[in-house]
Image (cartoon, grey):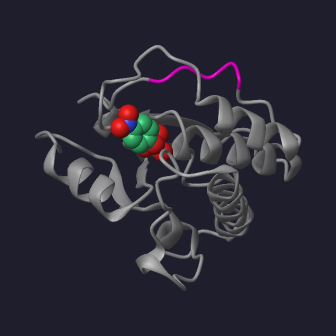
Amino acid sequence: MSRETSLLIVCLGNICRSPMAEGALRARLEEAGLGHVRVDSAGTGDWHVGNPPDSRAIATAARHGVDISGLRARQLQADDYRRFDWMLAADLQNLRDVQARKPDGASARIDLLTRWAGVPADVGEGAIPDPYTGDREDFEHVWRMVDEVASAAVARLRRPIDA
Ligand code: 4NP
C-alpha cells in the first residue's frame, strides 16, 4: 500500500484541467492496480459549482477513452486540507491560492501537480495552461500533459517508501 493514498487536484474552475487530470489519473491508476489511491478535484473559484466538466474537456477525454461526464465541479473547502494527503495545483496561480487559503491544522502537503509527479518542466515552469478560452488543440495539449502526469504518478506511487 502506498503511503500516499489521496490526491486532490486543484485548478481555477474545476471544469477543464482538474477534471481531465482526475480522469487521466483514475484511468492510469486503475490500469496499474493502484485503484486504492483516492483522486478528487476542486476549483479555487465557485462559478461552475455543480456543473459537469466543460463539453470540450468531456469530448477530449472521451477521444482518449476516458469518461469524465459524471464529474461535478466543486469549490475547494477548508476540510480538504485535512482530508487529502496531497493537494496538487494545475498552475502557479492555483498553487498560490491553495497555499494562501491553508487553514490552521492543515495536514495536506501542497505542490504543483507536474512537479509532484516528476514531469520535467519544459515550458511555463510546469504549469498546465488554462484551455478555457482556447480551442480543441489547447484541450488536446492539456490532455497530453495530464496523461504524462498520470503515467509519472503511477511510477511515483509504486516507488518503495524511502523517506
Ligand atoms: P479550469 O478552466 O480552471 O481548467 O477549470 C477554467 C474554467 C472556467 C474559468 C476559468 C478557467 N472561468 O473563468 O469561468
The vertical placement of 70 against 126, above or below, is above
Q: Image height check: is 92 above or below 84?
A: below
Q: In the displayed structure, does residue 49 sit left or right of residue 65?
A: left
Q: Position of residue 150 (x, y in %)?
A: 69, 58
Residue shown at 22% from the left, 58% from the top: 96
* Relative depth, front residue between 141 and 4: 141
Identify the residue at horizontal 83%, vertical 37% (top origin). 62
Figure quadrant, ligand 1:
top left
Span of residues in magenta: 69-73
Left or right of 144, for residue 75: left
Q: Quadrant of residue 154?
A: bottom right
Dominant SS type (magenta) = loop
Image coordinates for residue 49, horizontal then vertical, percent: 40, 18
Confirm whether residue 43 shows in the render. Answer: no
Front residue of 99 and 125:
125
Above or below, 120 against 161 in this view is: below
The residue shown at (79%, 43%) is 27
Q: Residue 42: within the magenta?
A: no
Q: How far across and how far down the image is residue 76, in percent?
A: 32, 32
Figure check: 44 above or below 125: above
Q: How many marks?
A: 0
- Report x, y in % for residue 1: 68, 50
Answer yes or no: is residue 115 visible.
yes
Residue placed furthest toward the top: 50
In the displayed structure, does residue 84 sit left or right of residue 121? left
